[in-house]
Image (cartoon, helix red, strand yellow):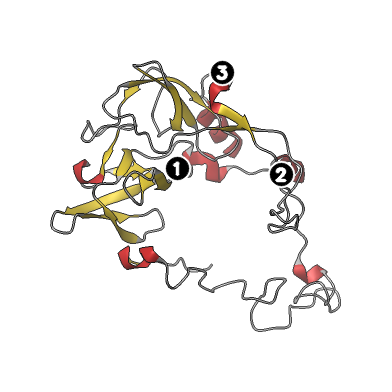
Amino acid sequence: MIRRQRMDNLKVLTKNKKPEKSLIVRVKKTGGRGSNGRITSRHRGGGARKLYRLVDFNQDKLDILAEVISIEYDPNRTGFIALLKYEDGEKRYVLAPQGLKQGDKIISAEKAEAKPGNRMRLKNIPEGSMIYNLELEPGRGGKLVRSAGSGATILNYDTESGYCNIKMPSSEIRKIPGECFATIGVVSNSEYRFIRWEKAGKSRKKGIRPHVRGIAMNPCDHPHGGGECGAPIGMPYPKTPWGKHALGVKTRRRNKWTTKLIVQRRVKKKRK
C-alpha cells in the first residue's frame, strides 16, 4: 500500500523534465567533516551525486505574475519544487504547494487572492488559512515550515502590536510580525512520511552510513558499552558518546531572542 501511495504522489511531477541549467550548482561533499577536517556530524559519507537546486525562499518579485512550467523532484529536500517563469522572462525555483499543477499562475504581492501558491504578508492573509515558507523577519526569506506535508495555521492578527499568532506544525503557538511574507497552502509530497526505505542500500545512496549501537561497543568507546550479551546500559538515563543526556533534555538555548515570541509551547506526545 505504501508503494502505491508513493507512485500516486509522483504522478504530479512533470515527465522527462531535466533541471534548469541556470538554477543548479554542484556542491562539494563534506563527509560530515568541518573546516578543520574533523568529523562534526557522524554517519555521513558517500552517496549518489546530486546537484543543488537554487530555490527562491524569498520570492521578492512582487506584483509580477508567474506561470508554473513544471513540478520537479528535488534530491536535497523532502517536498517537490516548482519552476516558475515570470512575465519578464526570468525563471526561478520555489517550494511547490499541494495541488499546484503545470500551467497554473501564481503571484507574490502585498495582498492577493488566497489560493495555494500565492504569497503575501501575514496581516493580509485570512484567519484560519494554512501557510508555509514563513518568514521570521521581514525581507529575510522563508525560514519556517518548509518540509514535505507541513503547514502552519494563522489564528489571528493583532493590529495594535502588529503581530500574528501562528500555530506551527508542532502545535507551538508563536507571534510573528504581520509584515512578514508567507505562502498559502501546504508543502507538497505529503505522503513522504509513509515511505519505507526497505533496505540499507537506499540509505547509503542518500549518503547515510551505518550507525552502530552504543550498547554493542566497548566501554572505552561509548558510555553504554561493555557487559555480556544483552546487558542493559547500566545507568539511569541514556547518554551520547560524550556523556551528555540523550533523551528528554531541552536543547534550546535559554537566551534565544525568539523565545519571547512563543505564546504556548508545543504539546509533547506521550510515548507508547
Q: Where is residue 134 in the image (x, y as percent from the top left)?
A: 36, 46
CA neighbours of label 1 inside 10 A, class few (<14), some (14 to 19), many (20+)? many
Nearer the observer, disc 1 or disc 2? 2
Pointers 3 and 2 in contact (CB under 8 A)? no
Amino acid under label 2?
Gly
The residue that label 2 is drawn on is 207
Pointers 1 and 2 in contact (CB under 8 A)? no
- Look at the numbered disc 2 and give the secondary structure of its residue: loop
- First in residue order: circle 1 vs circle 2: 1
Residue drawn at x 37%, y 34% is 59
241 left or right of 154?
Answer: right
Is residue 238 in view from this perspective? yes
CA neighbours of label 3 inside 10 A, class few (<14), some (14 to 19), many (20+)? few
CA–CA distance in space, label 1 to label 3: 23 Å
Amino acid under label 1?
Gly
150 left or right of 213?
Answer: left
- First in residue order: circle 3 vs circle 2: 3
Q: Quadrant of residue 88?
A: top left
The residue that label 1 is drawn on is 149
CA neighbours of label 2 inside 10 A, class few (<14), some (14 to 19), many (20+)? some
Amino acid under label 3?
Lys
Pick the residue in front: 34 or 76: 34
- Look at the numbered disc 1 and give the secondary structure of its residue: loop
Is residue 1 in view from this perspective? no
Residue 17's disc is 3
Residue drawn at x 81%, y 68% is 216
Q: Where is residue 210 in the image (x, y as percent from the top left)?
A: 77, 53
Residue drawn at x 67%, y 43% is 197
Q: Which residue lies furthest to the left in this view?
A: 160
Q: Quadrant of the N terminus?
A: top right
Give the number of callouts. 3
